[in-house]
Structure formats: structure tokens, C-alpha cells
Amino acid sequence: MTLARARPIAPERLCHWIGRLGAGTAVVWGDFVLDEYWRCLSRRVSREAPVLILEYQGRSVQGGGAANAALNLAALGLSTRAVGVIGQDAAGSELHDLLSAAGVDCAGLVTSRAPTIVKTRVVAGSVHTALQQVVRVDRGRPFVLDAAGRRRLDAALREAERDATIVVLSDYGYDSVTPALAAPRVRRWRAHEVTVALDARYRLADYRGVTLATPNESEASAAAGLAVTSDRDLVAVARRLQARLAAPHLVITRGRDGLTVWGARGGRSLPAWGGREAVDVTGAGDAVVAVGAAALAAGAPALDAAALANVAGAVAVSRRGAVPVSAADLERALRAPAGQRAMRRNA
């Protein structure tokens, strides 16, 4: 197996696929997270300890984890259904309402007595500077469903999977979806030509038979049990993951180094689209898996699907927070003169 640099793809060719991304029905099964932001001003340091004193200004929320993947698919125009677990609490209601407002079908969200997963980011700055993340506080533990809860989740999946063309497994380690729960369903979905995409934070190598997996480099390295310090190492990691996952398509995202797409004939690398520094990497992986899966389901070749996912990731990191990437965002980015120059420069 080798790794080569991919030839540049004309923006017009990628724009052709954008018009097809919204066809079909997507199911997102995974860990639904409420991303909470506390906006603060930082003007002075405490006399009690060498820490900033933050003046609270306001609060906002976004969809995180599987919720962000679902919001990205809905933004592409796909009919999108959510399947997972949320708490019977204010955060769960807020997450449900946020998804519903974006057109996501939330009938498959099973409620639990355990609290909804909430990630609170405190962001602060002075009056004339951009807000920067100061600290993040995570709340929530892996969900443990009783027999009745498991039956409700199974029924939700059976209902949601009807006429689905895409299933995204979004595993952030909270056990709404697990490799054991997914295994028999993945085989059935693939047998019915459903595009099954995987974004797994910690258990990547335990899944089998998906259509597409999209780990970042550190996730891929951990799953393969190999450090990556060179392209040769990356080839070894990809080879090991392809053998374990039995997935026809593997995309490894590499931050400012772009991404690599791997198939039966080896790997091809795509440089980071646009060449700009990231503003906020939150949610980039969700945009990549959503756009990559939608493009493959629409019939795009693997390299075209990866290239579109590469653009989606670049758009996602150019904005603060987990803001979904729409079809219009993709087309706008591809048709921008700066973007076209970047694609030629990356040749």
C-alpha cells in the first residue's frame, strides 16, 4: 500500500455533486450532546488567586456529538432522523427543541433518568478582542439502559431505518450506540445498499463492515496502536484499520495537513482546503462524516466524496462553535475566487 498526492479536482465537478446531496433519508444513531456556551468578559485578575475574574454576559447552545452530525445532514437537505438517548431534564428538552427546529425527526430519541450529556464551554475576552475558550466542563456519564429502555431504543431504530439511504454511527463513548449493538444492524443495512458511516471517538477498531470511517489522525493512531510520525507510519495505520474495519472507504483527517482517503489501491492525500488557520475545530469531524456519507450515497467517487468532505471541514473550522455546514455553504466556498485559487495552488 502506498500514499500519493491526489490530482486536483475542478470546483465545477464538486459543485455537480452538491445538488445531489439532499436526496434520500439519513438516520443518525449515537450520543446526542448539548453544547453550552457561557460568554464572559475578562477584565481583571483575582486578588485571591492568580486566576481571571469573568463577568458573565450570556448563554447560547448548539448541537454537539450526534446532534451536530444530524444538523449537518439536515442542512444538506436530507430528511434526517435522530436515534439515541437523552435525559428527562431541561437540557434534554432544549436539545430536542433545537433539533426539531432544524427539521430533524426526534421521534427516535429515547429518554432516560440519567442526565443529558452537556459540554459547557466558558469563552471570554475583553471588549475589543475575540472570545477564546477558557475552560470546558463536561456533564454526563455513559447511559445504562434497562430492559425496557433497550426495547424502546430497538423499536426506535426499526422505525427510523425504514427507507433510510444513509446511517451515521456517532459514538462519543456514552453507549447510546456501541459496536455490539451496531454489528447485526450494519450487516443488514449494507446488504440493502445503505451507506453506513462511522465517527467513533474511542472504539473505532471494534466496528466492522461500515461503508466509510472518518477518524482524525490521533483517533486512527490510537485505534491501530501505532504512532504516526511519518507518511510511512500513516500507511501502516491505514493498512491495519482497513483490515480491522473491513470498510471500503477510510478517510483520515489531519488538521492543517488536510486528509487522506484510502481504498483498495492505497491512499491519496488532499491538502487542507483554502489554506487558512482554523478558528475553532469544534464540530469539524461531524461535518466531514455527514458530507462524506451524503456524497457517497449520491454516487460520488470516493475521491470526490473526500474532497467535498475536505471543503466541509474547512468551512466548519472557519466558524466558532459547531455550526452546521449547508449545501449552500459548500457551493459558496467552492465558487469563491479564493477557493478556486487555493485548489489550483494545491495542484
Image (cartoon, helix red, strand yellow):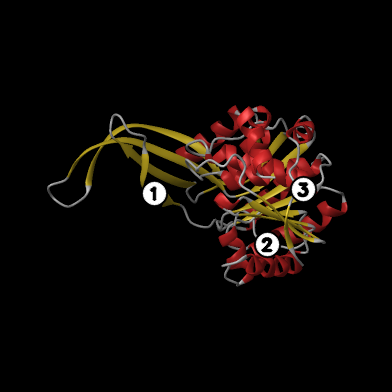
Residue type at mark 2? Pro
Q: Nearer the viewer, residue 19 or 159?
A: 19
Which residue position is annotated with label 2? 179
Q: Position of residue 105 (x, y in %)?
A: 67, 34
Q: Position of residue 150 (x, y in %)?
A: 65, 55
Position of residue 247 in the picture relative to residue 344 (left or right): right
Which residue position is annotated with label 3? 303
Q: Nearer the viewer, mark 2 or mark 3?
A: 3
Residue type at mark 3? Leu
Residue type at mark 1? Arg
**CB of mark 2 within 8 Å of CB of mark 1?**
no
Q: CA distance from mark 2 to mark 1?
A: 28 Å
Which residue position is annotated with label 1? 136
Label 3 environment density (alpha carbons within 10 Å; few <14, some 14–19, many ≥20):
many
Q: Which residue is painted at 70% across and 48% down in the image?
A: 168
Q: Nearer the viewer, mark 2 or mark 1?
A: 1
Counting residues from the N terminus, which is met first, the one under dot 2 or under dot 3?
A: 2
Q: Nearer the viewer, mark 3 or mark 1?
A: 3
Q: Quadrant of the N terminus?
A: bottom right
Q: Quadrant of residue 23?
A: top right
Q: Nearer the viewer, residue 148 or 302?
A: 302
Q: Which residue is painted at 82% across and 47% down in the image?
A: 194
Q: Which residue is painted at 50% across and 49% down in the image?
A: 113
Q: Which residue is painted at 46% across and 52% down in the image?
A: 140
Q: Position of residue 216 (x, y in %)?
A: 60, 56
Label 1 environment density (alpha carbons within 10 Å; few <14, some 14–19, many ≥20):
few
Counting residues from the N terminus, which is met first, the one under dot 2 or under dot 1?
A: 1
Residue 108 seen by the camera? no
Position of residue 219 in the picture relative to residue 134 (left or right): right
Q: Quadrant of the C terminus?
A: top right
